[in-house]
Image (tube, rainbow, N blue to C red):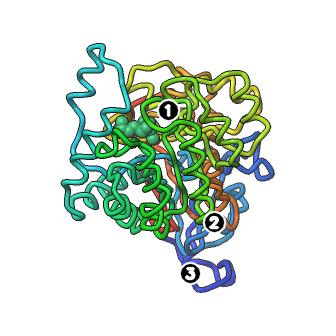
Amino acid sequence: SSVPSAAGGRAQGNSTTTAITHISSLITNDPSLGEGPLGLIQDAAIVIDGDRIAWVGATSKAPATDNHLDAAGQAVIPGFVDSHSHLVFAGDRTAEFSARMSGKPYTAGGIRTTVAATRAATDEQLEANVLRYLREAARQGTTTLETKSGYGLTPYDEARALRIAVAHTSETTYLGAHIVAPEFADDPGAYVDIVTGPMLDACAPYARWIDVFCEQGAFDRDQAHAILSAGKQRGLIPRIHANQLSYGPGVQLAVELDAASADHCTHLTAADIDALASGNTVATLLPGAEFSTRAEWPDARRLLDAGVTVALSTDCNPGSSFTSSMPFCIALAVRDMGMTPDEAIWSATAGGARALRRDDVGYLRPGARADLALLDAPSPVHFAYRPGVPLVSAVWRDGQRI
Ligand code: NIG
Ligand code: FE
């Protein structure tokens, strides 16, 4: 519904203002604006001015605006910040998933199947896939999404993936070091030279971040160190696929290189936890991967109790975690990883923003981007309480309803 604004009630500028009122629970993620770590405001209103949040507070104090929407007791949260996905791919791996569900283990080797399909795809096919999963994620409340290369593994195919991705998100990650390209199976050193040389040259213009899969069957500590250091010299910021399938050096390397995030963190020693607690690196947990590979859950409780900043993301990819659903990841994290509903909601919004070193998303406070989701529920606790139910009823990104 729309009501005319009172003269002088408008925020500054020529943009249109919209108020959403009677929000049962508004999650601001700013403790100075509301109760607890989520900065919860009850019976709240939020004012959008153009692409930004102009005001949050009690419905009774809401300023006059051009447009008005009555939330009628529903909750509003910041749009989800999915800080880890792999959307530039072709083909699928249904057979591999079915084999796993009858007892076969997950290995990094399956990535080769997707590399072959991705290389064979046209630009148009790859872009259509990216758009399909971006839209799917948006319908489920995701308004910021990071995505990676890593299924091309040649300078041409990696740069192509990033060029396609960067047209749709500014959060792009160069993952030439996903696995050693099949052509270099007998000479991984030569592949690392390409990743740090011509492939980096081709990809750096399209990427903000650089990532390495540091794992048995992928890249070891020294290789990961060389690759991330080369990326840093080109102005890319490191993040690492670390300690997913086994204990290993990835997490401590991430902290040492001041990586924005160590992702997966499934197999952690006490020293790994200490390193994360003393550094600036966010631990990004990806429960869709443990779900789809039938692996042990990461222990979020242990990380949180140690004071580590935790993000939750989907890892959406055709091999280990073919879900674009942040609500699903929240439900898993609460049920199986020791997170409270409030912690999981924070990690899926502000936590993801921290993992992407952003403060304009993940929060609903004046000046932030107007990226938010209206829920068909009185509280976001319902994401875990009512798993599998589509609770996101409307989404705004940059102030536009999508
Ligand atoms: O994050 N761990 C490495 N990469 C992906 C899986 C990629 C694949 O299996 O295709 C992940 O789980
Ligand atoms: Fe991943």
Residue in the image at 47% along x and 61% along y = 197
Query: Which residue is label 2 attached to?
Result: 53
Query: Which residue is label 1 attached to?
Result: 215
Ranked by sequence position, the earlier of labels 1 and 3 is 3
Q: Residues within 10 Å of mark 1 (few under 14, many from 20)?
A: many
On whether ligand 1 comes within 8 Å of the CB at mark 1, the answer is yes
- The image quadrant where one finds the C terminus is bottom left
Residue in the image at 61% along x and 32% along y = 249
Q: Amino acid at mark 3?
A: Ser
Q: Position of residue 358 (x, y in %)?
A: 64, 58
Q: CA distance from mark 2 to mark 1?
A: 42 Å
- The image quadrant where one finds the N terminus is bottom left
Q: Position of residue 266 (x, y in %)?
A: 55, 26
**Mark number displayed over residue 15:** 3
**Residue 338, placed above or below residue 214:** above
Residue in the image at 20% along x and 56% along y = 121
For the residues labelled 1 and 3, say whether their Cβ atoms are less than 8 Å apart.
no
Residue in the image at 34% along x and 39% along y = 185
Tell me: 168 left or right of 251: left
Q: Residues within 10 Å of mark 2 (few under 14, many from 20)?
A: many
Please identify the quarter of the rendering in which residue 261 is found.
Answer: top right
Q: Position of residue 366 (x, y in %)?
A: 70, 65
